[in-house]
Image (cartoon, helix red, strand yellow):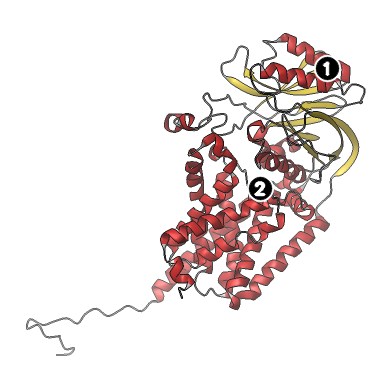
Amino acid sequence: MQKPDDWLASRWRRSVLAVLAGALPVLAFPGPALWWWAYVALVPWILLARTAPGGRRAAYDGWCGGFGFVLAMHHWLLPNLHVFTFVIAALLGALWIPWGWLVHRTLGGAPSRGRVAAALLVLPSGWLLAELVRSWQGLGGPWGMLGASQWQVAPALRLASVGGVWLLSFLVVAVNVAIAVLVAVRRARVPALAGLVATAAATSAAWGWAPRPDTGERVAIAVVQPGIVAGAGSAERRFDREEQLTRGLAGRDLDLIVWGESSVGHDLDDRPDLARRLAALSRETGADVLVNVDARRSGKPGIYKSSVLVGPEGPTGDRYDKMRLVPFGEYVPFRSLLGWATSVGKAAGEDRMRGTGQVVMNAGDGLRIGPMVCFESAFPDMSRRLAADGAGVLLAQSSTSTFQHTWAPEQHASLAALRAAETGRPMVHATLTGVSAVYDANGARTGPRLGTDASASRVYEVPVAHGTTPYVRYGDWTVYAALLTLAAWGAAEGVRTVRLRRGRPVRPGPPARTAHGSPARPGR
């Protein structure tokens, strides 16, 4: 009978197993949304890397697992980017090379209790390092951060208000490490159990200590979702449908109406007729209308995606130009090198223009709103900045029309729950084609959502929150703590290596020989 170690000796078998193990966490995210799965999903990957024959192979297991993770999280890009999706997954998967090596270094062989205790801090810190680098907008942004799988778990959302999604990722990885130790390293079960108890204690402490948002007055915000409008003249027909749905909101005593991303396909300066129609809608409904213009700007080169606030007299002058663009969807990074992606998929043929700063808008009656566009809602620093600048309600205008029958719309909408919990501010996620949803300042969903099959408008009573969460006040302290942990561990390992080398006995060299070829005899 073939032993498991013999079966894993094959490089190809081991690599395939690592890819599959890395893909397992995707089940914790929407659509399946098995949030509890996140706490065990990394265990097979950890067990595989710790049993690698050496650090180099463990690093390769980290790369293969990272490839599987990124590919599974972004599999819905395949119809658009085709083979380039695999290239992206291979490039981003390399970020988990250090993590695979760390797993083997801390848990390989028969680790002592001390090394297991270190692993409970070092491995989550190493995972955060990969997420930190991946969060750079040029590498695709922080879509699919492990902590984001906990968007519907109330205790986890309370933790997010303390340390952001980073803290959730750290604790989820720590639990996986502890469970892997309980499964494979019996002699070190005590520190593993201690790690689980510490995680439970931290969650309980956050539940009782973290300040709750002070929610007083409510505002009525309407979301207008036209649904799929495609084909010739789609921009005009979409506007007509949005206008029809908005006109039906008259008499509802609204404070704000929100349209989705690319809801207006022409610059309002070039099309004053559209500006007049929007102003008329604002007068009929008694509320400002936040639209999103996806068009070439009059007097400026290039295409912008801009959130524009329109009041009874027309555009108010409040405008936010999207800053963080979707790689390949709205621009091609290093186009001179990667421009061939446009020939194998639906990558952007022309780069969109970037905005230069975030904007908090005044929507009337003291309501201050902080708009974001599309996948900018994945960036915790953007919503944190808007909350710090005085936004009372966060908004994300999105489309997702390209990915209607995938997990992408559900995943995108779930991010709003995290941003709301982190900042203590309610968040509205308004799309062209679903999923549209609203979350209160605790990250709990307010009212029913609009699914991908809906073409409708809906009014939400949104409780406006006050106060500041620890995350808004202190920022990404979890990331800094993780980096310090890795630096301290690296320094300790360096000192340990030096001591071992100095304390190692020096082997005597071969005996010297005389001119006759016989060994020299001491003292003669």
Farthest residue toward the bottom? 524
Indicate which disc residue 281 carries: 1
Q: In the figure, 452 relative to 1: above or below?
A: above
In the image, 473 versus 328, the foreground residue is 328
Residue 66 x, y percent position in the rendering: 53, 52
In the image, 471 versus 250, the foreground residue is 250
Whether residues under marks 1 and 2 lie with C-beta atoms below 8 angstroms apart, the answer is no
Q: Element at badge 2?
A: loop
Q: Quadrant of the C terminus?
A: bottom left
Q: Residues within 10 Å of mark 1 (few under 14, many from 20)?
A: many
Indicate which disc residue 42 carries: none
Q: Residues within 10 Å of mark 2 (few under 14, many from 20)?
A: some
Residue 194 x, y percent position in the rendering: 68, 71
Farthest residue toward the left? 516
Q: Amino acid at mark 2?
A: Asp
Q: Nearer the viewer, mark 1 or mark 2?
A: 1
Q: In the figure, 73 relative to 521: above or below?
A: above
Q: Element at badge 1?
A: helix
Residue 190 x, y percent position in the rendering: 65, 75
Residue 281 x, y percent position in the rendering: 83, 17
Residue at point 53%, 73% (across, down): 111
Disc 2 marks which residue?
Answer: 476
Residue at point 57%, 61% (across, down): 122
One can see residue 390 in this view: no
Q: Amino acid at mark 1?
A: Leu
Residue 517: name its quadrant.
bottom left
Count the marks: 2
